[in-house]
Image (cartoon, grey):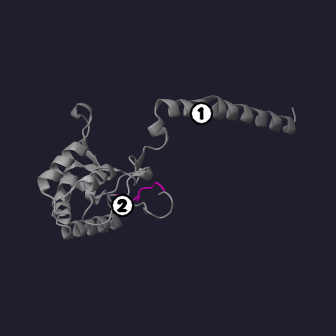
Amino acid sequence: MNALSRLGQGLRLTLVLWLLTVVVITVPMLGLARIAAPRQAEGSLVRVDGRVVGSALIGQAFAGDRYLQGRPSAVAYGGGDSPASGPSNLAPGNPALAMRVAAEVVAWAERGVGRPAADLLTSSGSGLDPDISLEAARQQLPRIAAARRLPIDRLEALLERQSHRPLLGLARPPLVNVLAFNLALDELVP
């Protein structure tokens, strides 16, 4: 068998495998996903008055004291149509990480949080984590209450409604989706 014949065989095999993996398997699975879980297949988009304001699965930055703040991120939110996923890749012993965490501690102290929860200081592996711990959310309530002129007990009640707890209380602490909480905040009347 000559080299040209082997090249032809390789190209045919590549085409057959591509058709099998893309057309025969993937396309029907995508169609099934759109039927079985349409919200998730569309990216778990969150809409307000018909307008997309974010995704329940992707963190985003919020400015000002009126809103719950999420985890710090290596991703530059707002730099284009959508952020690219990516961690900071700073090892625990990296001095740049220590400096960034120290700067976060100072920034949170200026916002009235003396000992911030770990997730307010460290970014997630993907850089896009939409959730923070219940502890991190509670630490921010006094600042939000003052900015919105709301009693803190109303914010506590909202936080309890917005927190999602793990199945049977296993494996992780309760979490709060930052976008969902902030949207619910905007619906509160002072």
- Kindly identify the amino acid type of the residue bearing the numbered disc 2: Ala
| Badge 1: residue crowd in 10 Å (few <14, some 14–19, many ≥20) | few
Q: Position of residue 70 (x, y in %)?
A: 30, 56
In the rendered structure, the answer to whether residue 129 lies left or right of residue 170 reads right
Q: Which residue is mark 2?
A: 61
Residue 129 can be seen, yes or no: yes
Quarter residue 169 falls in: top left
Q: Position of residue 77 (x, y in %)?
A: 42, 61
| Badge 2: residue crowd in 10 Å (few <14, some 14–19, many ≥20) | some
Q: Secondary structure at mark 2?
A: loop
Instruction: Please give the range of residues in magenta.
Output: 84-91
Q: Quadrant of the C terminus?
A: bottom left
The rendered magenta stretch, by its main secondary structure, is classed as loop
Q: Position of residue 93 (x, y in %)?
A: 32, 60
Please give the label number shown on residue 83: none
Q: Is residue 12 above or below residue 125?
A: above
Q: In this figure, what is the number of numbered marks? A: 2
Q: Secondary structure at mark 1?
A: helix
Q: Quadrant of the N terminus?
A: top right
Closer to the chain start, of discs 1 and 2, is 1
Label 1 or label 2, whichever lies nearer to me, is 2
- Kindly identify the amino acid type of the residue bearing the numbered disc 1: Thr
Q: Is 89 included in the stretch rendered in magenta? A: yes
**Residue at 46% of width from left, 33% of height from top?**
37
Q: Position of residue 65 (x, y in %)?
A: 24, 65
Separation (CA) of disc 1 from disc 2: 34 Å
In the rendered structure, the answer to whether residue 182 lies left or right of residue 55 reads left
Please give the label number shown on residue 26: 1
Pointer 1 with pointer 2, Cβ within 8 A: no
* Viewer-side residue, 12 vs 180: 180
Quarter residue 76 falls in: bottom left
In the rendered structure, the answer to whether residue 74 lies left or right of residue 119 reads right
